[in-house]
Amino acid sequence: MKRWLCGALIFLTLTGSVSAVSDTPETSAGAAALLHADTGTLLYAENADAPMGIASTTKIMTALVVIEHCDLDDPVKILPEDTDVEGSSMYLQAGETCTVEELLYGLMLASGNDAALALARYCGGTVEGFVELMNQKAAELGLTQTHFCNPHGLDAEGHVSTAKELGLLACHAMENNTFREIVSTNDITIKNLTYVNHNKLLRTYDGCIGVKTGYTEACGRILVSCAERDGTRFVCVTISDPDDWTDHAALLDWAFENWEYREITASYELSVLSGTEPLCAAEAIPARLLLRRGEQPTLRAELPRFLFAPLRKGETIGTLTATSPDGLSVQTPLICRSDVPADVSMCLTPMERMQRIWRLAGHGMFAYHIH
């Protein structure tokens, strides 16, 4: 038999500072979203569900699909049709050969539309076939309002996403080590050409580790960024924002000032039958939960009403769930703190066990002893 315990009964340690919550900043964006990168939790939204053009931030999906389907060392021969495209370029020449990795750097640092076409053709067989892969990946990620018509982000009817879904895509992409390494690179030299990352937050914002800029006249300025401090990462998205560098810095500052990971631990003592000790100390394996500064989580522990010896140190005997007021939660095991051997002089028959349980219940000895 198990019992759910409220947080009020638990000895709790929350490691982290507590301070007043600052005001949410205003932006100049047509749409904006800020998400916790590890969980995809939306922490700030401004018109975040409106489908809009996303320009070259499309290349986040292009890069992710290529990384998942191709080897980085694969050679790609550049065709004339790869170079016949308007907009930003990594200056590929028809007839030359580049590796997939080189093209990915040109795609994400220089925002090369030529690199996008070359990678799409190589990875998907045709550009159209690659776009199908992009939309399949969007569906796999649950991005229901996202649709791609090309791999580079030049204006096309129906080529849209939302600030929230673009942020969710970035959260997923940043889990990929290769993707993260590329978008966090400030500059790189490939075949005597040096490419500098268009994302200047890498150079101006403390903790920035990516992701991608975008611009067309129809879409305006689009920016997706990711920043990390002390193990906490946030993804910020603005669409149609003439002051995106300033707005991202303000939103990320707000996130770091008002949200933090805190370590949660708890411990108990439970009654033990037929053991050399009458009680067993149980403790939670420390877990981290994202919380607003100054807020406390709701805690629930699921534990048996009593235990039978023998028990081993580290044995799982229950679970602790901590939930923030915003609905984030983390679950961690409750384990025995030490061995509790069986008392051989008290080996009980099943009937004797039932009698002992009845006697303990009659004397109210099933209460938890909080450590």
Image (cartoon, helix red, strand yellow):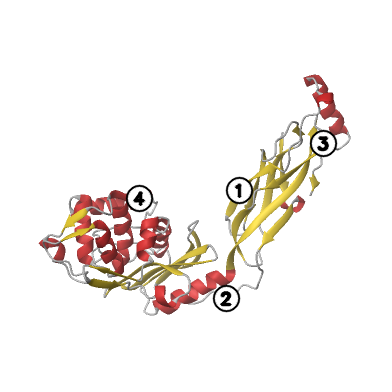
Query: Nearer the N terminus, badge 1 or badge 3?
Result: 3
Label 4 packing within 10 angstroms: few (<14), some (14-19), many (20+): some
Query: Nearer the N terminus, badge 4 or badge 3?
Result: 4
Which residue, as the protein is rendered here, is positioned at the far right? 363
Q: Is mark 1 on a helix, strand or loop?
A: strand
Residue 331: image tag: 1
- Tell me the amino acid under the disc marked 4: Ala
Q: What element carries label 2?
A: loop
Residue 139: image tag: 4
Residue 269 in sight here:
yes
Vertical arrangement, residue 260 with respect to residue 343, above or below? below
Q: How far separated are the C-alphas under marks 4 and 1?
A: 28 Å
Q: How far separated are the C-alphas under marks 3 and 2?
A: 53 Å
- Tell me the amino acid under the disc marked 3: Glu
Q: Is mark 3 on a helix, strand or loop?
A: loop
Q: Is mark 4 on a helix, strand or loop?
A: helix
Q: How far separated are the C-alphas under marks 2 and 1?
A: 31 Å
Q: What residue is rendered at 43% in x and 78% in y?
A: 204
- If the image is split into quadrants, where does the N terminus sit? top right
Q: Name the residue under label 3.
A: 277
Q: Quadrant of residue 241?
A: bottom left
- Depth check, front residue: 62 or 281: 281
Vertical arrangement, residue 81 with respect to residue 272, above or below? below
- Tell me the amino acid under the disc marked 2: Asp
Q: Name the residue under label 2.
A: 23
| Camera-nearest label, 3 or 2 | 3
| Camera-nearest label, 1 or 3 | 3
Q: How far separated are the C-alphas under marks 4 and 2?
A: 35 Å
Vertical arrangement, residue 94 with respect to residue 371, above or below? below
Place of residue 281 in the rendered image (x, y in percent of width and height, measured from the top left) = 76, 43
